[in-house]
Amino acid sequence: MATMLESVWERNCIDMSAIVFVSGSNTSAAVALIFFQFFLGSSPQLTIFLSFLISSFFMEKSEVKLIGKWSSPYVMRVKIALNIKSLQYDNFEETLNPKSDFLLQSNPVFGKVPVLLHHDKPICESLIIVEYIDETWSTAPSILPSDPYDRAIARFWGAYIDDKWFPSMKTILTVESEEERKPYFEMMEEVVWRMEDTFGKCSKGKPFFGGDRIGFLDIAFGSFLGWLSVIEHRCERKLLVEAKAPSLVKWAERFAADPAVKGLIPETDKLVQISKALQIKWRAAIGKK
């Protein structure tokens, strides 16, 4: 009797361990294992075999995929949002020269990264993707503010950054003379000034634009810190300085050290090399016009 009970206990432990194992990969996988056990019976050997077989099948069909490029600040936004939500995803690194069929099929309108695929349905444009992640995986921590007005303000400044910040960076790297760069440096200085003021209003004395933790506006602005270092390095001109933006300087340090961000900001030297290649491409594009 004791031996029989031990056998049942051992078998049930193996069954439950297998279900836990496959459910860590996919809920559907766990359901499939229970289904097969019900109709085929259960033995330790069969359970272990089925768990690995079913888990492998479902793991190949990942729920979340990201098409991106390591050097893109827009892709970095999505990766931070995924990290905040502790989501597992398959990363597909793009060369962009030429663009892959996977990218062109997933974003046929613009052919740009990032593209998030959720159950093989593509979502494009970085800030739209960040909002989608926050709404789809709505458990804490939240990325967008809970208050409707605060959400609107965060979206406004996110759009402002995309309209003014990176286009100015790109132009600074594209034009050749200091005189041509001057108005774009002035624009970047204005953005820094406005974001310093905005930080005080949005953070309300807390470490981030989003309050106690990284939020939507932190992601929108902070994703460009790596490329800001490129501009400062190549043009030998500091834009984020404590004398003019003390709050932003400290915020940038906290942002880069946050667990959701750490390791995602590319090394400046690597980005500098990328920027030189892009500079040639951008200048050639101007010459064709």
Image (tube, rainbow, N blue to C red):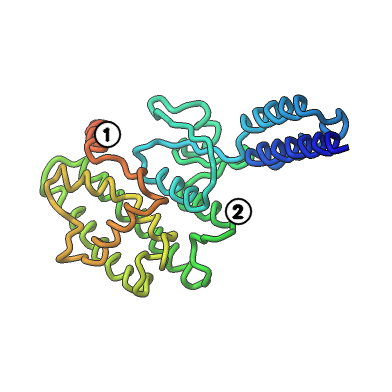
Query: 253 or 287: which is nearer to us?
Result: 253
Locate residue 32: give its quadrant. Answer: top right
Label 2 element class: helix
Give the x, y percent position of residue 204. Answer: 37, 74
Locate residue 137: give its quadrant. Answer: bottom right
Q: Which residue is depicted at the point 26% across and 35% down?
A: 270
Type of amino acid under label 1: Ile
Q: How far separated are the C-alphas under marks 2 and 1?
A: 34 Å
Q: Which residue is depicted at the point 50% across and 48% down?
A: 82
- Image quarter (top left, top right, bottom left or bottom right) of the C terminus: top left
Position above or below: 223 against 112: below
Position above or below: 201 against 7: below
Residue beneath disc 1: 274
Residue beneath disc 2: 136
| Disc 1 crowd, CA 10 A, few/some/many (<14, 14-19, 20+) | few
**92 with respect to 196 (left or right):** right
Label 1 element class: helix
Position above or below: 144 against 57: below
Q: Which residue is depicted at the point 23% across and 60% down?
A: 249
Type of amino acid under label 2: Thr
Query: 159 or 285: which is nearer to us?
Result: 159
Q: Which mark is residue 187?
A: none
**Which residue of the protein is positioned furthest toward the front in this rendering?**
2
Give the x, y percent position of residue 19. Answer: 72, 39
Give the x, y percent position of residue 112. Answer: 44, 38
Query: 195 or 98: which is nearer to us?
Result: 195
Position above or below: 256 against 64: below
